[in-house]
Amino acid sequence: MIDFEKLLEETIKQLNEKNYIEFSADQLSKLRLDQAQAIVDEFHGYALLKMPKSEIDFFNWLKVNDRDIWNDIWQDEDDIYLVSIDFLLHFMEGGLGFPICDLVDQPNYWFNARLIKPKGMEELESIIEKLEKGNKISVSEALLLEISTRPTDIWHFCYHHNLQVERLKEVVDDLVYKGFLVHLTDREDLLKYIDI
């Protein structure tokens, strides 16, 4: 259990001293959703949040494994790994991490369930049947399943499943070719599908 009033005082103090807010992994694990939303509401529009170490570790991996994507996000930023407080819920336990869906110079590989075509939804039924029977599923099937349950970008998927980025791009191409998935690479096209 977290002393929310004390945390709020510490948060205000941090913001005054450092010009951004930072939470430890322990604080994030103990923060309830309603408390996190209260913090977002309180500081919305003017506070920056430093990403937690787990997400910084991901971006350090990305810098090595797909430098062009890292550059697209961070190269021109003075305040590296500082994001809007609105992303706080993304960094809580079970959160999605910072969504990579707004790339300018590189193609986006961000998906959610609304981008799964009817044929892909039919395929999901057979994937679920496989899992219920205790059978293994392929990387392609695992990606489609994850997209059906939560917004996903290929870089977080690769990081969490120890996969090569180029392999996942081929998997996405195959899912598109089979008529299972819509791939919108341009951020303007993605906007109507993003609910962050």
Image (tube, grey):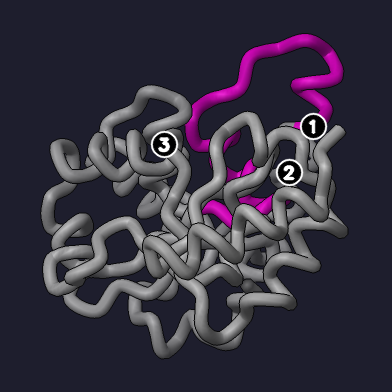
Q: Earlier in the sequence, mark 2 or mark 3?
A: 3
Mark on residue 124? Answer: 2
Give the extent of the magenta segment: 128-152
Give me the residue at 49% from left, 51% from top. 22
Q: Give the image location of residue 115, x and y in percent.
A: 61, 68
Q: Is residue 8 left or right of residue 15?
A: right
Mark on residue 128? Answer: 1
Q: Is residue 188 visible?
A: yes
Front disc: 3 or 1: 3
Q: Is residue 183 visible?
A: no
Query: Label 2's element?
Result: helix
Q: Earlier in the sequence, mark 3 or mark 1?
A: 3
Give me the residue at 63% from left, 76% from top. 43
Please state which of residues 99 and 87 is positioned toward the viewer in this rendering: 87
Give me the residue at 41% from left, 89% from top. 188
Crowding at label 3, few (<14), some or many (≥20) Cα neighbours within 10 Å?
Answer: some
Q: Give the image location of residue 169, x and y in percent.
A: 31, 48
What residue sits right under mark 3 in the picture? Answer: 53
Q: Amino acid at mark 1?
A: Ile
Query: Label 3's element?
Result: helix
Question: Are the residues at dot 2 and dot 1 in contact (C-beta closer than 8 Å)?
Answer: yes
Mark on residue 148? Answer: none
Q: Is residue 193 placed above or below 89 in the rendered structure?
A: below
Q: Is residue 51 left or right of residue 186?
A: right
- Label 2 and label 3: CA atoms lie apart by 34 Å
